């Protein structure tokens, strides 16, 4: 509702509760002030790459921690989980020095590569596979002559599909909404959506609230579209993964 009104309508009581007629004008202002097309494309690339890589690597690591026996497994898992307690602000300076040295400042790979896997995803998949994947099934596959890659592809992935779908959705949304690190690593010439929103609505000592909320509307619609398209598959995958005791 707010995106379809002018700034004066929004800040003047009473707050409008019905649609206005300025949505198209506000959208034009958004595209004039920032490169929203580039921002949407960049955010889509970043969110898809991060979600895919996190789901893949977290599933592989989760399987290793859940079902494979190797020396130091519990200690290594403890270290992985402990990294979740480190505030991301502590890693900003060394990470920025790294991307500066390799010349990635202002490029989207500086946002993608540091987020290819997350400790939360590893722990999440480990907990799921520890309960959902019987060790006897893995041993039976080995007896039948399957190597590790075949076991992962034909045994682990099908069983882990519900958790992979949920993790992928969570990581996609988190990556799409991430602001702190992209704001540091990128710029308004090559932004993600959240970085582009930071440059909206600024005027001569004033803020155009209508333009800001219009930009927020544009940033939210892709997430609603993704959930509308994939939500049923995700819920269906969770239901299919349920096992009666």
Image: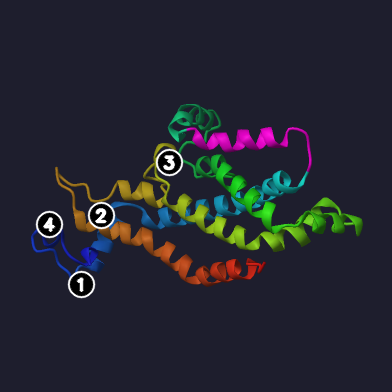
Please tell me whether mark 4 sits on a helix, a strand or a loop. helix
- The tag earlier along the polypeptide, 4 or 1, is 4
Query: What residue is disc 3 on?
Result: 186
* Alpha carbon distance from label 2 to label 1: 17 Å
Residue 129: which numbered mark, if any? Answer: none
**Left or right side of 241 for 2:** left
Q: Residue at x 64, y 54 (%)?
A: 128
Magenta span: 69-86
- Determine the residue located farthest toward the left in the rendered image: 13
For mark 3, give the secondary structure: loop
What residue is pinned by disc 4?
Answer: 11
Q: Horizontal placement of 156 versus 54: left or right?
A: right
Marks 4/1: CA distance?
15 Å
Q: How much space separates mark 3 and mark 4, taking CA atoms? A: 32 Å
**Place of residue 230 in the rendered image (x, y in percent of width and height, measured from the top left):** 52, 68
Residue 19 bears which disc, if any? 1
N-term mark: 3 or 2 = 3
Residue under the image location 25 percent in, 68 percent down = 24
Q: Which SS type dominates the magenta stretch?
A: helix
130 or 87, nearer to the observer? 130
Q: Is residue 234 left or right of residue 154?
A: left
Q: In the structure shown, which secondary structural element does the residue marked by tag 2 occupy?
A: helix
Q: Nearer the viewer, mark 3 or mark 1?
A: 1
Q: Position of residue 222 (x, y in %)?
A: 42, 63
* SS at circle 1: loop
Decide which of 198, 146 is in the foreground and name it.
146
Q: Which residue is mark 2?
A: 212
Q: CA distance from mark 2 to mark 4?
A: 13 Å
Q: Is residue 114 magenta?
A: no
């Amino acid at each position: 509702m707010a995106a379809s009104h002018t700034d004066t309508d929004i800040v003047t009581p009473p707050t409008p509760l019905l649609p206005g007629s300025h949505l198209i004008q506000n959208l034009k202002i958004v595209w004039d002030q920032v490169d929203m097309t580039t921002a949407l494309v960049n955010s889509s690339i970043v969110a898809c790459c991060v979600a895919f890589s996190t789901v893949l690597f977290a599933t592989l690591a989760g399987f290793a921690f859940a079902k494979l026996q190797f020396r130091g497994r519990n200690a290594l898992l403890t270290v992985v989980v402990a990294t979740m307690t480190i505030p991301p602000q502590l890693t900003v300076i060394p990470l920025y020095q790294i991307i500066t040295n390799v010349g990635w400042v202002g490029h989207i790979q500086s946002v993608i590569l540091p987020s290819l896997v997350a400790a939360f995803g590893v722990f999440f998949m480990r907990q799921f596979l520890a309960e959902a994947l019987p060790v006897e099934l893995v041993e039976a596959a080995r007896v039948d002559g399957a190597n590790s890659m075949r076991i992962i592809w034909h045994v682990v992935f099908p069983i882990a599909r519900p958790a992979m779908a949920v993790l992928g959705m969570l990581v996609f949304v988190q990556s799409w909404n991430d602001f702190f690190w992209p704001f540091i690593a990128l710029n308004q010439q090559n932004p993600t959506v959240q970085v582009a929103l930071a440059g909206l609505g600024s005027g001569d000592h004033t803020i155009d609230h209508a333009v800001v909320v219009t930009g927020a509307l544009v940033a939210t619609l892709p997430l609603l579209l993704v959930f509308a398209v994939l939500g049923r598959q995700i819920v269906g995958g969770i239901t299919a993964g349920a096992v009666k005791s």
